[in-house]
């Protein structure tokens, strides 16, 4: 089946329903701004603890609309990037940054209105001693990300959808969203409808 050339944002809760809960990054990776959402294809980066040199390589390789997805092994001491590096990501058209680790200059980064998902912030810069790898399969919290996989992000976290599954997952996602909307319109119409729904569910 041909994949969509441009995939639109869908809520991560809906994407999760579309693939039966699989692909949730978890691992305390959250957005630094709750009002921004994210969708795009992954350019992956594997970093040694404290290292960030390969991030620059990934920025150079990324295409417009890609998402940088970085496994920094959960390190909370040295930041993967700060406002200057993240501004470069934004300038070249990268859609967002997802890090199993931390960033710095968080207020300046928030002001960029650029989607960043991470474990928090640090005052300490990363180092550039080499050893990082770009576009290999990586772990992201409890999910696995391959280069080209689809990344969806919002205030509920990060969902990873394998590239080969995107059409099937989006079809299921849309069906579930339509089903949920119909249920809400019916069940939440009146108090009587709510009680009838509860009785039905409790009898299962």
Image: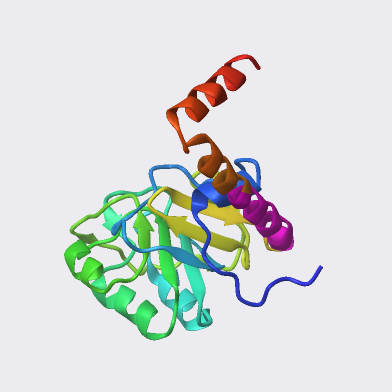
Task: Tell whether position 168 is magenta.
Answer: yes
Residue nearest the observer in this picture, 23 or 173: 173
Residue 36 % position (x, y): 35, 63
Quadrant for residue 125, please give it. Answer: bottom left
x and y, in percent, of residue 90 in the image: 36, 79
Identified at 45% across, 77% down, the residue is: 94
| Picture layout, residue 38 above or below residue 174 | below
Give the image quarter of residue 122.
Answer: bottom left
Q: Residue extending furthest bottom?
A: 92
Number of numbered discs: 0
- Residue 161 appearing in the image: yes
Name the main secondary structure of what is drawn in magenta: helix
Residue 73 in the image, given as x and y percentages of width and height = 43, 49
Judge whether residue 51 is colored magenta.
no
The span shown in magenta is: 164-178
**Where in the figure is residue 196, as x and y percent of width and height?**
55, 23
- Is 14 in front, or is 175? 175
Residue 138 at least partly seen: no
Image quarter in which the N terminus is found: bottom right
Q: How is the image coloured?
A: rainbow
Q: Nearer the viewer, residue 188 or 167?
A: 188
Residue under the image location 48 percent in, 62 percent down: 69
Frontmost residue, 1 versus 143:
1
- Seen as rendered, the residue at the extreme top is 203
Q: Is residue 62 above or below residue 197?
A: below
Image quadrant containing the C terminus: top right
100 to 199, vertically: above or below:
below
Locate residue 78 relative to residue 166 in the image: left or right.
Answer: left
Residue at 45% across, 64% down:
38
Taking the image as shown, residue 63 lies to the left or right of residue 120, namely: right
Left or right: 117 with respect to 158? left
């Amino acid at each position: 089946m041909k994949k969509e050339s441009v995939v639109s944002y869908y809520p991560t809760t809906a994407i999760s329903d579309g693939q039966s809960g699989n692909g949730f990054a978890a691992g305390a990776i959250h957005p630094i701004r709750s009002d921004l959402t994210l969708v795009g294809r992954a350019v992956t980066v594997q970093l040694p603890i404290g290292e960030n040199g390969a991030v620059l390589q990934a920025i150079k390789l990324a295409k417009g609309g890609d998402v940088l997805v970085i496994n920094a092994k959960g390190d909370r001491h040295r930041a993967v990037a700060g406002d200057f590096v993240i501004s470069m990501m934004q300038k070249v058209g990268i859609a967002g940054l997802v890090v199993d680790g931390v960033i710095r200059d968080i207020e300046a980064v928030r002001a960029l209105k650029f989607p960043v998902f991470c474990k928090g912030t640090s005052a300490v810069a990363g180092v550039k001693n080499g050893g990082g790898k770009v576009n290999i399969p990586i772990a992201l919290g409890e999910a696995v990300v391959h280069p080209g996989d689809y990344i969806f992000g919002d205030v509920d976290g990060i969902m990873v959808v394998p590239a080969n599954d995107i059409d099937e997952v989006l079809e299921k996602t849309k069906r579930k969203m339509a089903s949920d909307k119909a249920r809400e319109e019916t069940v939440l119409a009146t108090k009587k409808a709510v009680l009838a729904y509860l009785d039905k569910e409790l009898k299962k």
